[in-house]
Image (cartoon, rainbow, N blue to C red):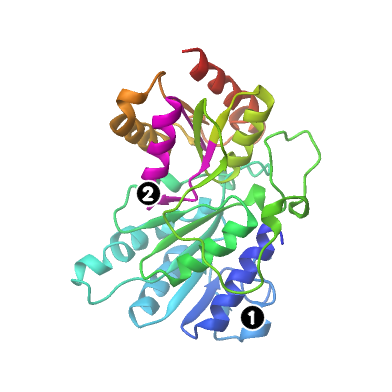
Amino acid sequence: MNMIEALNSAMDVALTRDPAVTIFGQDVGYFGGVFRATDGLQRKHGLTRVFDAPISEGGIVAVAIGMGAYGKRPVVEVQFADYIYPATDQLISEAARMRYRTGGEWWSPITVRSPYGGGIYGGQTHSQSPEGIFTHVAGLKTVIPSNPYDAKGLLIAAIEDDDPVLFFEPKRLYNGPFDGHHDRPVEPWSKHPASEVPEGHYVVPLGKANIVRAGNAVTVLAYGTMVHVALTAAEETGIDAEVIDLRTLVPLDLETITQSVSRTGRCVVVHEATRTCGFGAELAALVQEHCFFDLEAPIERVTGWDTPYPHAFEWEYFPGPKRVGEALRRAMEA
């Protein structure tokens, strides 16, 4: 399966297993979603389980919170992460607070799916990476898969979770494991081992990172598209890097991170979002707090620049394998 097919399979499994699961959002019903992630689900599960919603992100999430309080398990789609901002009040002031405000009597078992990130010539309104806004909010969980197998297992785990989950899907990875070289042919998922996705139910637990490349010289922390870019940079530089796919930012698998950095003594943090107050800043702070006496070099950050995502200069903004490779070399030379 490619990532779209894996996400579709996850929602199909969830709808089949649990009658409380309901899917709605802009164009997710009849049309099957702008990226076709919900294709065929309305035909299979009916008009009351999978349906379209008006163009009102705040309204979509507000309805989901209400349905969750009444025992439903809604999965909603915000067509692009760039459009999620009208819903932030509902997510932060209501969904994240529900369990605490009611002393545990009510909660918000909702999942908000949203394609995010660049690399598709979407410019500043279709390429943003807003995960850092939501990782800052207590009560929200934030998940970002990097391959089809994880996408299905993590999405099922998110849907079955009793607390609100932001599920950001790297849209550049929908059809293949993008290595950052935009001038090369697209590699399909069919040639990647993570495209082997079981048909039925399974979960990838939230809060458990994955070491996708073992190494001894330096630890690379990445998620989403940047996992594949980091792997490419390690191969091209010949540096014995250990690449950790975080999978979920909240909850964070701090144990796997600290064990790796304590062993390698060096750390490079990579993400596509803008640099200032990006999630990489939190990662760097945690590594410094927990691994200070093991560090042999300053922590490196490779990120998007502090500017709206530029359309004409997309590949100057995108932290590709060249920039990641330079950071790896700086970490090794220090």
Kind of element beneath mark 1: helix
Distance CA(mark 1)–CA(mark 2): 32 Å
Q: In which quadrant is the N terminus drawn? A: bottom right
Residue 35 visible in the snapshot: no
Residues packed near mark 2 inside 10 Å, few (<14), some (14 to 19) or many (20 plus): many
> Which callout, 1 or 2, points to the residue nearer the camera?
2
Give the magenta part as a residue range: 243-272
Question: Measured from the top left, where is residue 125 in percent x and y?
Answer: 57, 46
Judged from this view, the residue extending furthest toward the left is: 103
Three-letter amino acid code at the position of disc 2: Thr
Judged from this view, the residue extending furthest toward the right is: 185
Judged from this view, the residue extending furthest toward the top is: 333
Front position in the image: 186 or 333 = 333
Three-letter amino acid code at the position of disc 1: Gln
Residue shown at 52% from the left, 36% from the top = 308
Q: Which residue bears the numbered disc 1? A: 42
Q: Which residue bears the numbered disc 2? A: 135
Question: Measured from the top left, where is residue 221 in percent x and y?
Answer: 48, 37
In the image, residue 261 lies in the stretch drawn in magenta: yes
Front position in the image: 40 or 328 = 328
Q: Quadrant of residue 79?
A: bottom right
Is residue 161 placed above or below 257 in the rendered structure? Answer: below
Question: Measured from the top left, where is residue 139 in percent x and y?
Answer: 30, 59
Residue shown at 69% from the left, 77% from the top = 40
